[in-house]
Amino acid sequence: MSEPSLPNHQATPLPEAVAGGVTDAGAEACFDRITRLAAQGLGMPTALFALVEGDGHRLQSRFAATPLAALPPAGVVADAVGPDGVTVVAPAALDGLGLGFCAGVPVRGPDGKRAGTLCVLDAGPRAFDDSGRAMLADFAVLLERELAAAALRRQAARQQDKETAARALFDHLPEGVMMLDESGVILACNAVAEAMYAATKNGLIGRNSNDFVGEDPARLRESLKAGKTDQLQAIARRVDGSVFPAEFSIKLLQTSGTYRYALAVRDISARRAEERKAQAAEARGRKYFVTATHELRTPMASVLGFSELLLKHDFARDERIEIISVIHRQATRLVKLINEMLDLARIDSGSKEEFDLRPQDAAAMLEQTLSGLDGLHVSSRIHTAVAPALPQVRADSLKLQQALTNILSNAIKYSAADSAIQVDVFETDADAGPMVGFRVTDRGIGMTAEQQARIFEPFYRAHTDQETAGTGLGMTIFKEIVDLHGGVVKIDSSPGAGTAVLLLLPAVAAAH
């Protein structure tokens, strides 16, 4: 059965803290107890407490010692109670409600507005003196106090929820954040800051922030005084004494006359590493350009010089063929040099992500590499020993074949035409875990320790007295490819005793 609305002059929306049934279980138990005590204290068989909700009343609690034949809706009862003080409802207003007596009093909410009504009821007529009125008013005060307490609990719960949400946000920020007092003492910090500084939970709180700026603490102190500094870079010091490059942003906060500072800390080690890498690449590029200019000039000079001879003079057939052979050889070297320079530039400007790295069979890649050398007619010189059941390696097949081709070409180039070249493929363990090794061993002219130290430099050639000395980029390209595969290179060589080049690549763990 729906309950009639109260007149507009009496109905006031319930404060948010108690509206819509949001009172907690403890408050509801108190409402029940106060309603019961009101009935018993006044000697009434029935009492009820109804809360204002929207434009009507909602029954909150009721006590009946001896049930009435038919209790009217709470809204109808509350509607009969005046807006101020205790109201004893006139008998004429109770006709048709099955009641002989009704007295009620408004219950105010924390905002002073009517939040509900407390009523005592009886089926027959009753006398109600001033002491009864006073007692009923006192029970209403108890209800008002409970409504206020419920509102405070609700407000505290909301505040706690806000603080929990703020703390969760605080802890999940991608950078370290500290709250400092006027002297720079850390009042609070998030988990990121603790991890950044290698501190235990709450291990930074109470310490001065200047302890963690290793380069110049005075700079941070001056920034704190200034109120705000963006991107102040300094060397930060962890709790264990180790250091890292950091960037600080400082913001002055003022609340209730108290100064606080929000200090955001970013570990810029990765950024610095990328900057150093970019600077090294730029320096390397400048060096490439200067050296490449010289390297290109030599074959170009030969091509131009010998071609001019052909244009200016008539030569006998044999001499002409010899000159054309020189031009062809130098042009071939020029094309090879340009191709390798472009290849190195692509590798140097790229990244590991641009390689098509996927599990590859080591034996199959070696076989494909050797098939590409068939044109050199050296298959009889190359002997292979491939261990069985090798794990796969994660590699870009074409790039790794290029790297293997480079070291095999060197082995062929710098050893006698009738000497053997040994290629071994095997599994081994290293500090980084299981590895697959490719070892190419020749019996050629070998290298000194000084030559080995420079072997990966662009355009460096350990042996320049041979017609087939090459471009000096093969081993540079080889090393770049190996590095982007996460591999390791080891070289063992001595003059006259040959060279062994070992390439180790991380093995792919077998799927279980």
Image: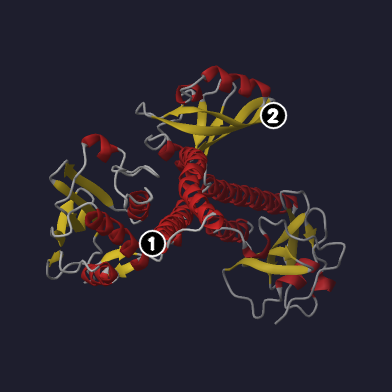
Residue 261 drawn at (x, y percent): 61, 29
Residue 175 visible in rendering = yes
In-front residue for pair 107/421: 421
- Amino acid type at circle 2 is Ser
Residue 368 drawn at (x, y percent): 27, 72
- Furthest toward the bottom, the residue is 1
- Furthest toward the top, the residue is 218
- The residue drawn where x is 17% and y is 67% is 390
Residue 1 drawn at (x, y percent): 70, 82
In-front residue for pair 158/23: 158
Image quadrant holding the C terminus, namely: bottom left
Residue 268 visible in rendering = no
The answer to which quarter of the image holds residue 411 is bottom left
Question: Residue under circle 1?
Answer: 318
Packing grade of label 2 (10 A; few <14, some 14-19, many >=20) is few
Q: Which mark is residue 36?
A: none
- Callout 2: helix, strand or loop? loop
Question: Residue under circle 2?
Answer: 256
The answer to which quarter of the image holds residue 31 is bottom right
Spatial CA span between label 2 and label 1? 101 Å
> Left or right: 58 with respect to 236?
right
Could you tell which of marks 2 and 1 lies nearer the N-terminus?
A: 2
- Amino acid type at circle 1 is Asp
- The residue drawn where x is 70% and y is 57% is 16
Mark 2 in CB contact with mark 1 (< 8 angstroms): no
